[in-house]
Amino acid sequence: MDIRDVARLPNVSIATVSRTVNGVRSVDGRLAKRVWKTIEELAYYPNRSARAIRQAVQHLAALWHTQIGLISGPLALRSAVARQEAFEASMDEIGLAVGRDFVVQGDHRLEGGKRAFQKLSRLPEPPTALLCSNDMTAIGVMREAFELGIRVPEDLSVIGFDDIRMAGFLIPPLTTVQMSQSELARLAFEGLINEIRNHNPLPEGTEYLLKTRLILKNSATLPAGPERRKMRSATKRVTRRSATR
């Protein structure tokens, strides 16, 4: 069961379910009740092992972004491929198309983030939000955006990955997916010991689950333009209805 099943029963959009689950206030109260009722009836709980590598995409969709891009890591790395596949699967799950030129390969470094964003910023209709393979890439994006006169988050929302200490000192502080370094070290050690003990290792290797979570800060907000005006209008309607009750 996934988010599409939850949307089907109360006959609402996938985006409405995403906004409801993520607590966006502009969702009509009656729709939100129908969604939560369906969630309870179906006993729907997002798969926690996959919730975080897709929570970032759902967060941006809940903020009304539809033009979401990705700057991946080097695709020679298995982790970079996994994150790109998770991004594409998450976009498909909530019914959003990945723009043909919206996925650009980076190198996990600040300079790679700058170069990748240069390419994206030259598109006729560039993305309004970007997921980055790691925080250093996101920092490079934010630096290049500053040099181009593009405001974060007013003109461009940015989400990183790793939650490095520097992320909290940026202006604005970076919304990012947190990955525990101590847990990563523990899993790496466990994997090394297992490989030493296993005389017949699997040819495809062994996978280990590293739990992550989205850390909300200030680098992501509503998109500029028509989407922002539509969101504000919807928020005002909900506020007026609440005031008259």
Image (cartoon, grey):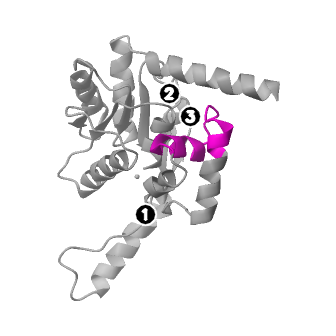
Return the disc, 2 or 3, that comes first in the chain's sequence: 2
Q: On the picture, is 11 further left or further right than 73?
A: right
Q: Are marks 2 and 3 in contact (CB under 8 Å)?
A: no
- Identified by mark 1, the residue type is Ala
For label 2, the residue is 170
Start-end of magenta stretch: 12-32
**Quadrant in the picture for the N terminus:** bottom left
Q: Are marks 2 and 1 in contact (CB under 8 Å)?
A: no
Q: On the picture, is 173 further left or further right than 84?
A: right
Q: Secondary structure at mark 3?
A: loop
Q: Is residue 199 magenta?
A: no
Q: How many angstroms separate mark 2 from mark 3 (CA)?
A: 10 Å
Q: Nearer the viewer, residue 209 or 189?
A: 209
Q: Residue at x 52, y 17 (%)?
A: 229
- Identified by mark 2, the residue type is Leu
Return the disc, 2 or 1, that comes first in the chain's sequence: 2
Q: Residues within 10 Å of mark 3 (few under 14, many from 20)?
A: some
Residue 111: image x %, image y %? 26, 29
Q: Residue at x 36, y 32 (%)?
A: 130
Q: How many angstroms separate mark 2 from mark 1 (CA)?
A: 26 Å
For label 1, the residue is 185
Return the disc, 1 or 3, that comes first in the chain's sequence: 1
Outermost residue, bottom direction? 199
Question: In the displayed structure, would residue 162 be above or below residue 132?
Answer: below
